[in-house]
Amino acid sequence: YYNQNTFIYFNGSYIKAADATTDLYSQTLHYGYGVFEGIRSYKTVTGQTKIFKAEAHFERLRQSALALNLPYTYSVEELIEASYKVLALNDLQDAYIRPLVFAPANMSFAKNTVSHIAIEAWRMEPFLGNKMLRVVTSSFERPNPKAFHIHAKATGHYVNSILASQEAKQKGFDEALLLDMHGYIAEAPGANVFFEKNGTLFTPQLGNILPGITRATILDLCSELNIPVKETKLKLEDIYHADAAFFCGTAAEVIGIESLDNKPFTKPWAETISRLIQTSYKNLITENQKTILNEVLGTE
Ligand code: PMP
């Protein structure tokens, strides 16, 4: 993630990652009481570096901090500017950007203390890879929204994600799918999920999931491309015989699911709407307008 020459943004300054310090007495370290974001930048078709959906991510960071009562004094604009500077200082174009807001060295985190903010960036391949995934339903449920602000991207929530991913891998699968406390399909440990059936896409409704920015982008794409999509409650038995399925997230991008609980999705990926969404998303992040049109018109 970093070496001796890596720069980060830390509380208003640009410093070497190796010189940054934190404190053993930070509440974030002890209790997972912090918030973060996962953002990507891309080299666009014109060669420029563009942070994808930068405003939406930094607005979600602010909302996450507000939900947790973490002191938060940063503007969206200053953090976007800082992120571009971190990319430039590290000579990065296709990168993952990780802002982290964490508690200072004060176990009580008394009023009037300010949070720390760090923005790091590193090169990252699609985090679930490029191959279709073999997915298993997790024995872990997503956290109950009555116990956590599940719409906030809080560091502590990711213990649940890590446990679910570890379990899936131990069982020989690529990734987990988690249900909510009522047994409805929720999301992956770090991505949202869509299913495709008879030309319509289905995705779990908001409420018990992280409101993914990629999910929202895909809903926009569906409306642009006239693809029918339903946000609804989904049970496993509703989707076991779907035509196709995919995970989506900033880090994962759009990645097809080969099988769920060893039940394959049978439609050839190349013939699915899901694949069209995957291509359209790829074009969108690199601002490749022309090929989206070609794809829709079937001229590619
Ligand atoms: N759900 C969870 C639990 C996640 O961690 C993520 C990644 N942030 C997502 C969904 C997808 O969100 P986004 O598209 O905003 O990256």
Image: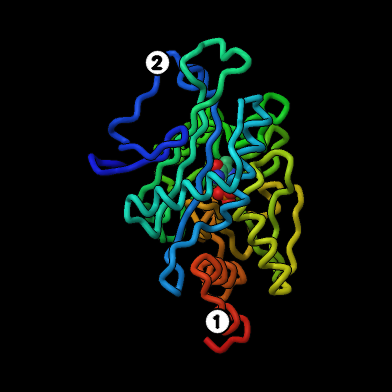
The residue positioned 46% from the left and 36% from the top of the image is: 12
Whole-percent x, y for residue 192 in the image? 60, 49
Element on which disc 2 rests: loop
Query: Which numbered tag is attached to residue 24?
Result: 2
Q: Give the residue type at disc 1.
A: Lys
Q: Earlier in the sequence, mark 2 or mark 1?
A: 2
What residue did someone put label 1 on?
290
Q: Is residue 258 visible?
A: no
The residue positioned 41% from the left and 71% from the top of the image is: 47
Q: Is residue 127 above or below residue 98?
A: below
Residue that extends furthest to the bottom in the rendered view of this protein? 299
Q: Is residue 110 visible?
A: yes
The residue positioned 62% from the left and 71% from the top of the image is: 273
Whole-percent x, y for residue 44 in the image? 46, 69
Closer to us: 183 or 12? 12
Q: Is residue 42 above or below residue 47?
A: above
Whole-percent x, y for residue 257 in the image? 52, 58
The residue positioned 39% from the left and 15% from the top of the image is: 24
Residue that extends furthest to the top in the rendered view of this protein? 108
